[in-house]
Image (cartoon, grey):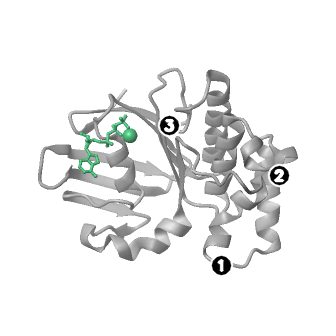
């Protein structure tokens, strides 16, 4: 498999205080999944933010898609962030007053990018795949939590990113909806996208990849 991201001995401390990550090693390939567990405050979101090029690290090395990521130049990776990485969060981050379709197309509307036929076809395919095709023109405020999260996942997928990052994506969902969301992630990985997801729920599994516990600033295989 094609390696997409590799971290070697990555350290992170905020404002020079206590180290949150203390020499963490991690790698993921296209089509692979990584599920991260860990107690509250152990550094899971910190780790995800670094993987997703949203935050810098203090020491070590990080290579994403063949590019060595230099912490001081984080702002220069906006293209990788916009094109190669899709983000999914616990609170969905959708706009309630507009339709499912408009939310999904937001990454294009936001950047004033032309939406061609391929994008629309891709959207319809994803809506079918995640069983919410009939909700396409529905106002997002009318959706259930599980439906909302699937919309958020499709929005993250619409630009065919190489990596999906999900921080507690099922934190607000019941068991049934959590499974639907995780099944969606499995499908995403089968399409060749890498998925890194953090969850408190130990019953959920992504099936295709590794499960880690983040402990004492390092990732340990479960
Ligand atoms: N911007 C920040 N400035 C200073 N300290 C921070 C910052 N962000 C996180 N921290 C601290 O770093 C540690 C790890 O936080 P992080 O949010 O990564 O944990 P987490 O594992 O995601 O927790 P949770 O499961 O509650 O979401 C915590 O002690 C937190 O207080
Ligand atoms: Mg967190």
Query: For residue 164, which numbered disc appears in the image?
Result: none
Query: Mark 2 sits on what residue?
Result: 136
Work out whether mark 2 precedes mark 3 in sequence or the reverse, and give the earlier one: 2
Q: Position of residue 169 (x, y in %)?
A: 54, 39
Residue 103 drawn above or below residue 144: below
Query: What's the CA distance linking mark 2 and mark 3?
Result: 31 Å
Which dot, 1 or 3, sits closer to the camera? 1
Q: Position of residue 175 (x, y in %)?
A: 62, 22
Residue 205 drawn above or below residue 126: above
Query: What's the CA distance linking mark 1 and mark 2?
Result: 21 Å
Q: Position of residue 56 (x, y in %)?
A: 28, 61
| Res 190 → quadrant | top right
Q: Are marks 1 and 2 in contact (CB under 8 Å)?
A: no
Mark 2 secondary-structure assignment: loop
Q: Is mark 2 within 8 Å of ligand 2?
A: no
Residue furthest out toward the front: 97
Work out whether mark 1 precedes mark 2 in sequence or the reverse, and give the earlier one: 1
Quadrant for the C terminus, please.
top left
Residue drawn at the location 23% of the way across and 52% of the way down: 10
Mark 1 secondary-structure assignment: loop
Q: Quadrant of ligand 1?
A: top left
Query: Mark 3 sits on what residue?
Result: 209
- Left or right of 75? Residue 168 is right
Mark 3 secondary-structure assignment: loop
| Res 62 → quadrant | bottom left
Query: Mark 1 sits on what residue?
Result: 112
Which dot, 2 or 3, sits closer to the camera? 2
Residue drawn at the location 61% of the way across and 55% of the way down: 156
Q: Is mark 3 within 8 Å of ligand 1?
A: no
Q: How many marks?
A: 3
Residue drawn at the location 57% of the way across and 51% of the way down: 93
Residue drawn at the location 67% of the way across and 60% of the way down: 158
């Amino acid at each position: 498999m094609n390696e997409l991201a590799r971290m070697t001995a990555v350290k992170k401390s905020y404002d020079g205080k206590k180290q949150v990550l203390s020499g963490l090693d991690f790698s993921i390939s296209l089509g692979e999944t990584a599920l991260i567990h860990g107690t509250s405050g152990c550094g899971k979101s910190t780790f995800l933010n670094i993987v997703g090029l949203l935050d810098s690290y203090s020491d070590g090395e990080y290579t994403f898609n063949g590019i060595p990521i230099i912490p001081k130049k984080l702002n220069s990776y906006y293209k990788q962030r916009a094109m190669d990485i899709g983000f999914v969060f616990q609170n969905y981050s959708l706009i309630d007053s507009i339709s499912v379709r408009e939310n999904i197309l937001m990454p294009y509307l936001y950047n004033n990018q032309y939406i061609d036929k391929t994008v629309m076809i891709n959207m319809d395919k994803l809506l079918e795949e995640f069983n919410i095709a009939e909700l396409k023109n529905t106002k997002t405020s009318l959706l259930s939590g599980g439906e909302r999260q699937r919309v958020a996942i499709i929005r993250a997928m619409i630009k065919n990113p190489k990596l999906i990052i999900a921080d507690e994506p099922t934190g607000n969902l019941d068991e049934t909806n959590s499974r639907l969301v995780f099944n969606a992630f499995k499908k995403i990985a089968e399409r060749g996208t890498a998925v890194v997801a953090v969850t408190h729920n130990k019953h959920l599994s992504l099936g295709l990849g590794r499960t880690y516990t983040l402990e004492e600033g390092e990732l340990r295989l479960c």
